[in-house]
Every structure is written in C-alpha cells, then in structure tokens.
Image: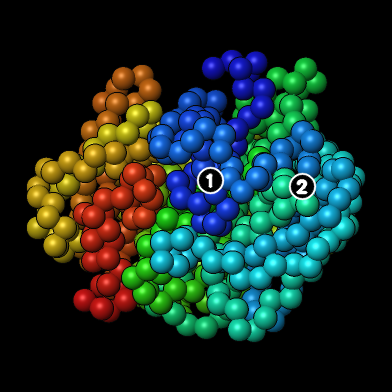
Amino acid sequence: MGAEQIRRWESGALAHAVTDPFGQGPLPWLRGSENYLDDTGHVVPWYADPTLPRGSTGGGTRTADDVHRQIKGFSSTGAAAPGEAIDFHITVDPPRQFSVDIYRIGHYGGDGAAKITTSPRLSGIVQPAPLAADRTVSCHHWWQSWRLQIPAYWSIGAYVAVLTTIDGYRSHIPFTVRDDQPADLLLILPDITWQAYNLYPEDGRTGASLYHAWDEQGRLLGEEDAAVTVSFDRPYAGAGLPLHVGHAYDFIRWAERYGYDIAYADTRDLHAGRIDPTRYRGLVFPGHDEYWSVPMRRTTERARDNGTSLVFLSANTMYWQVSLAPSASGVPDRLLTCRKRRGPGKPALWREVDRAEQQLLGIQYAGRVPDPHPLVVRNAEHWLWDATGAGEGDEIDGLVAGEADRYFPRTTLPEHEDRILLAHSPYQDSEGVTRHQETSLYRAPSGALVFASGTFAWSPALDRPGHVDPRIQRATANLLDRICKRA
C-alpha cells in the first residue's frame, strides 16, 4: 500500500475492542467497517467488529482529530495512587467549554466501565502547537487544564478520562490508579509499547512514532525514517486511546467478572521499581507488550526466580530493548528511546544482545499472521485444558491472529523443572510460507509458572463480542486458579 493511500495514518485507535465501555454509543475507535493498518501499512481487518454501524458515535458526539485538534489531551503521569493527583493538559480549538468524565474499566454487569466522577465545566484554550526536534514530538509546554485529586476511597484499576466539548467533540486519556497493597495478581498495562506506536499528531506533517513519520510532502515514511525517541508528553493519536488498548480491557472485564484479586500498574512502574512483584502470586501482561527496558526484564526475572508466576497473553513480547529518560524539565521516564538497527551502539533486539526473549518466555516472536488461523490444541491431557472440552488436535477458530510466537530449537531455554507446548498451529505468512505458532508453559526451579499464549488473539477470546471462546476462558481460569492457589 503506497504512502499516498495512507496519508492519514490510522494508528489503530479506531479499531480495537468491540463494546462501548463508556455508555455513550459506539465510539469511533470501535467502528467495525474501518480497516486497521499495522505498522507496515498493511490492512489488518481482524480487530474490527463488522456488526457495528459505520461512522456511528452515538449521543450526538463527534471524534476530535489531530488536524483540527477540537479537543486533545494527555496526563502528567501514567499511573498514580489514591491520595495523589494527576494533571491533565488539554487543548481546545476553537476555545470553548468542556468537561471530563472519569470512567473505570471493569465488567460492571456487562457495561464494560462505570462513570466515577465528572469535572466541573472547564474553560478550554488553544494550546501551542506541538514541538518537534529530530522527529521527537512533545507538548510538554502545554498549560495544565485540570487537576484530578484521586480520593483515597477510589478503587485501583484502569481508568479513562473522556474529554467532551460543549458542542460534542470527544477525545480520551487513559491512566491507571495503583497502590502497593498485596494481591493475588498484578496486571501490568503496556504503556511503553502504547507510546512506541503513537503517531500523534496524525496531521500529515508533524507526527512521528518509532515506526513512521511524515516528510515535507506529506508522505508517510517507514521505520528507517521514523523517530528514535518519542515523548509521553503528548496525546495519543486519533481518538486518544492507544493501539491494542482493547486487549488489556478484554482481560480486565473478564477477570473482574469472575472476582480475581487484581492490583494494577503500568510498565513504567515496573521499570522504575515502584512495585515489588514478589508481593503477588502472579504478574499478568494482558496485551501487546513489545518494548522492554533492562530494569523491566531484570525485575520480572527476579520475580520469577522468587516464585512469582508470569502470564503473557499476547505475542511479540519483549522484542525491542528500550531506554527511558527524563523530560527537558526533569520529570522521570517521559522520553522513550529505541534505536532499532540505526546508528551507533549495541543492537536493540533482545535476541541480538544474546538475551533472547525465549530465555524468559519459553517461546519468542516468529512473525506476522496476515489472516486468522485456528489454534491447534496440543497435549490436551494437560491440566490447562481440563474442563475445556478441547481434545488433541482440536482447532479453535481464529485464535492465531495478528502476530505469533513459537519455540526456537537453537535458542537457549530458561531453566525449568518441566515444560510443555500446549498448541502447535500452522498458518500462512504474507509470502504463503507455512509456519507454526506455539503456546508454552514451563515451571521454573522456584515453582513459578510461566505461560505464553503466543498469539494476539488470546485476550480478545476472553470477553470481546464476536471473539469469545469458552475453551480459552476455561483454560485461562485453570491457569490463574492454579497460580492463585484456587485449584
């Protein structure tokens, strides 16, 4: 697909999850008739729900865009604890009043979210244009628009601020409320990977991610011309929700429905050492989690070696090694750098620095899956498949999708007491070559279980309409119940 056909890049904010978690009618990021363009510009229709009406937003609202910037914003921090504050930096063009509704993601009787509070009516201003230097786009110079003081009684969890102008334009800002109390499971939201894919602003001129940027003629350039460093001090492109955010929301709705004891954090919390993973029976990585820093990996490996289990519910995990740095004003972890294969210095792929992902996950990234394929059950007598009804060689339609992992025989495995592959699924890559996806589980010497689904489609199978599969729901419950000592 030529750059001229995708001048306005769809970052994916129009194409994940298929239920409206905010009770305001179908959101633009849920539109099923839109195709999702992946980071190479190829069409990936799998994420969309074909039953949703085209262009419907419901409730008289319209989606803000990055060209006109009717309303856009970002938060001062990705995660905060009850008693702390989050500052929102918001631009409104033309200036007019707006409000901020705060929603918490969860099951909530099938609604997907609950409104927690609403701001006073606020006066919007036009903030300065984003600054760009060496393709790093930042809005750190925007004035504070509203401060949310998080009450002590608020539940921890994944939250979304829904920004709405008085005339009905809308955008979003995700954030996390966390604490340091022990729980059975710690859910880690992949905000570092979300930012790597963020092309804000999608205006055909300024925006850049670690995958794309525009040139002076408005042509969308590829990875070799993309940003090396991206900033958290900017909105997310499009509707303001990150690419693949729906994967995390799918897991959250399902897990809260069935009463799992969950704490919340994001990957920058893991990086900065703000969480002690040994306080939890298991760490859950619910969505696409491709970009990892050295401290993230070190902390996760230490958790496993101390008996904390690890659950990876996507594919292409821990592929690129990244670093985080403070903003120009000294705020920690606001700049994300990944040189990939460009410039001096060590390689950025974990497997090229002799620390392949498989040494933690048990499997590692194998490639893209252009069209969904069945997941083929292997070792059906294993307890993971108990009560699922799945038999040896059974096919679970559509469960190998997006990207896939597999076992690499020439790559070192982690130390383990026992290890098993629970799926072995053929699929065709973009060149028509048959490849295989695999799902892995091993027990570390500490007793910790490490599960890797090896496919993007696992979390959507838990609670996404049109993708739910009871066998995957039961298998995931078998895994979590064992980790939480329910089984």
Local crowd size for mark 1, using a 10 Å CA cut-off: few (<14), some (14–19), many (≥20): many
- Point 29% across, 26% down: residue: 428
The alpha-carbon separation of the residues under discs 1 and 2 comes to: 18 Å
* Disc on the earlier residue, 1 or 2: 1
Query: For this view, does 219 lie left or right of residue 41?
Result: right
Q: Is residue 21 above or below residue 315?
A: below
Question: Closer to the camera, 415 or 204?
Answer: 204
The quarter of the picture where residue 425 lies is: top left
Front label number (1 vs 2) = 2
Instruction: Determine whether, in the image, residue 250 is placed left or right of residue 408.
Output: right
Q: Which image quarter holds the C terminus?
A: bottom left
Q: In this view, does 416 lie above or below 217?
A: below
Residue 343: x percent and y percent? 68, 34
Residue at image location 14% in from the left, 62% down from the top: 386
Give the x, y percent position of residue 283: 42, 67
Kind of residue at disc 1: Pro
Helix or strand or loop: what does disc 1 sit on? loop
Kindly identify which numbered label has been placed on residue 80: none
Mark 2 neighbour density, 10 Å: few (under 14) some (14–19) many (20 or more) = few
Q: Which amino acid does label 2 sit on?
A: Asp
Choose between 407 and 287: the one closer to the eye. Answer: 287
Q: Can you give x and y, in whole percent of width and height, for residue 345 in the image?
A: 65, 41
Q: Name the residue under label 1.
A: 26
- Residue highlighted by disc 2: 167
Compared across the picture, whether 146 is left or right of 358 comes to right
